[in-house]
Every structure is written in structure tokens, then in C-alpha cells.
Image (cartoon, rainbow, N blue to C red):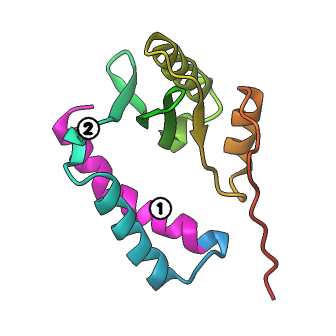
Amino acid sequence: MTVEQYLRYRQQAEASYARNIADSGAMPAPEAEAKAQEDYAKLLPDGLATPGHHFWTAYDGDDEVGMLWLHVEQKSDGPHAFGYDFEVRPDLRRRGYGRAMLQAVEQRCREWGVRSIGLSVFGFNLPARTLYEQMGFEATAIQMRKRL
């Protein structure tokens, strides 16, 4: 991902994350917006140059089709990765790009000796959950909520 692509990503990413938090029912929109700003500031203090964080833009030829943000962290048993953001352009979804992107990052992680890849997905995002399950991801924790 180039600096220009990262800046474009960051402009929309915090707002999108805040909307997802609010849409999930986890907290009202104002608190979700504050949380999104705090999370991004904490996770990426040096933006694209933050150590351990990797950003990729996926292409089909010259056409940008999606992006992926992965953090790799050393733990006592070796490196582990966490996918913070993963997106395929809305008009190109359900065409295999997401699967190809996940396979590519999985291959890169194997090359780096990464032992596992984690991620979070909002409960309402059934298409993403389905893809992750098809790709072999398993639930490690589930939060539930009942709206009154």
C-alpha cells in the first residue's frame, strides 16, 4: 500500500469502524466514534510506518480491488498475526477476490513462520463470517446482545 492509498484508507476507515460498532449495538454512535478514533491512534501511532503492521492493496491488473491490514506480533511460542481490516470493493464482492486475498496473506504468514492468524468480525456481517469459516477460521469467543 502506498502512502497515498493509506491516507485515503484512513479517511474512511475510522468512520466505517465507528458505524460498524454502533450498528452492532455495542455502543451509541458518539461513543463509537470516540472509540474508533482512540483505537486507530493507539494501534497506528506512526501510520503506515508503525512497526509490525502491514498494509496491502490488492489488484486485478491495474484495478484496485481491496485492501488488507495485518499486524504480526512475537509471542512466547513464535509470531502470531491479527487481521485488523480486510475489505473488497463493494461492487466486486462475491467474485473470489476475498478468498484470493486471504490465501495470499496466509502464504505470506507461512513464509514468516506465523503460527496463527486471528481476526474479528461483527456478528451482523454474515457474508464475511461465511467466508472466514470457509477459509478455516474458527470462533474463539462470541459476544451476544439482546436489544430491548
Q: Nearer the viewer, residue 55 or 65?
A: 55
Q: Which residue is mark 1?
A: 17
Say left or right for 57 vs 100. left
As measured in the structure, the alpha-carbon distance from the residue carrying label 1 to the one carrying label 2 is 22 Å
Say left or right for 78 vs 135. left
Q: Which residue is mark 2?
A: 51
Mark 1 vs 2, N-terminal side: 1
Figure check: 62 above or below 140: above
Label 2 SS: loop
Residue 27 picture quarter? bottom right
Which kind of residue does numbered mark 2 sit on? Pro
* Residue appearing at x 35%, y 30% in the figure: 57
Figure check: 134 above or below 5: above
Q: Is residue 88 visible?
A: no
User: Magenta stretch containing residue 11, yes or no?
Assistant: yes
Q: Are marks 1 and 2 in contact (CB under 8 Å)?
A: no
Q: Quadrant of the N terminus?
A: top left
